[in-house]
Amino acid sequence: MIKRNITQELLESSREYPVVTVFGPRQSGKTVLAQQSFPDKPYYLLEDPDTRLAAETDPRGFLAQMPKGAILDEIQRLPVLLSYLQGIVDKAQQPGMFILTGSHQPDLHTAVSQSLAGRTALLTLLPLTFEEIGQVQPELDVFELIFRGAFPRLHSQQLQPSRFFNGYLQTYVERDVRAILNLKDLSRFQQFLVLLAGRVGQVVNYTSLGNDVGVSSTTIQHWISVLKASYILFELPPFFANISKRVIKSPKLYFTDTGLAAFLLGIQSAQQAARDPLRGNLYENLMILEILKAHLNRGLRPDLYFYRDSQGNEVDLLIRQRGGLLPVEIKSSATFSPAFLKGIESFRKASPDCLPDGVVLYNGEQLHQMGRTRVFNLLKEAEGWSSLME
């Protein structure tokens, strides 16, 4: 069984709040996490028709079965329960009563925040980190990770990625998202997903995407907002405060699992991922995703950005820490080049918020120190990794 890095944050949150809500994509391991962390709590899956019918017909009676609380899995199937939970936890005044999990519902986060304001801690569980995968697969290859992705069952059960993602796409993405969007033409949405995979790590252009799919830019924005709320995509916003130069002000899009992006691109092996024209974009997606997971697993707000000016000077990732921004350049090359530092040096000149330190993440074996900039492989250097979170 894979122990999840978020476990400590979950347990500590349950000692402070009467409710802890764990959001995240389908199959990211929310159910196993909740049951592992709270083995003595009764468990109710709200996707089960009989359980949902009982809760919907008599919510007070349903919740009365759990005087000491419970795990309520897939709460988005019956958000009306949230209002009843508010009264129960206010009366009981006990920490750690209810553990909720939820996915694939754009309005769920708002509903939880409104109904349980001040009563719940909010956590997000994404698929496995490098460290978590290492518990079952000690030798990690970066392009195997890009191709295979990080959903727990792919590693704990050694499932075949293309079969898993084909089912995942049909069962969760198309079914759940289609129901939310009320799509009449699924083929256009499928085309849209493939186009998004082909533009991973690029600045989003709603008009261009709309023209390619044959829908309006407004429709594209709506589709992307639903995919973000469903934990299929995440946005990396641009940083432009206190910058004198003209800079890009549109976000970049990434997938919350590179395996799904690789599947949509038709990548069928690690070797193919290593040769694919989008290898650099997918590598960048994987590294930024790993840093995002580290923040979320500690219950931290991920204050992450990118920078690009009108002359093409760019920093792949900016991490806000210690009152400034740590610039991080990401390269899939196994050979270090001083040219990797160009974007970081440009940002240092352009922004007074830039910290004197910098980081280059690359796919090589050796550590380098270029002035105040550290160069290392995030997959292999635990010490370098921890320094990003100081």
Image (cartoon, rainbow, N blue to C red):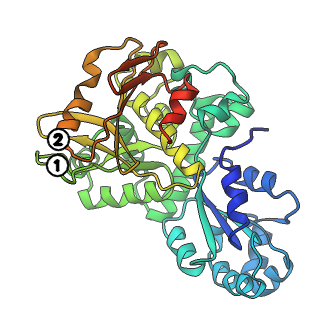
Which of the two discs, 2 and 1, labels the residue nearer the N terminus?
1
Q: Residue at x 46, y 33 (%)?
A: 287
From what the image shows, is residue 297 above or below residue 283? below
Q: Residue at x 68, y 71 (%)?
A: 17
Give the residue number, with chain letter if any, for mark 1.
Answer: 243
Amino acid of disc 1: Ile
Could you say which quadrant of the image residue 38 lies in?
bottom right
Determine whether, in the image, residue 77 is placed left or right of residue 105.
right
Give the residue number, with chain letter if any, for mark 2.
Answer: 350
Residue 114: in sight, yes or no?
A: yes
Q: Position of residue 155 (x, y in %)?
A: 69, 31
Amino acid of disc 2: Ala
Q: Position of residue 320 (x, y in %)?
A: 38, 48
From what the image shows, is residue 113 above or below residue 283? below
From what the image shows, is residue 138 above or below residue 170? above
Residue 73: in sight, yes or no?
A: no
Q: CA distance from mark 2 to mark 1?
A: 6 Å
Q: Nearer the viewer, residue 150 or 216?
A: 150
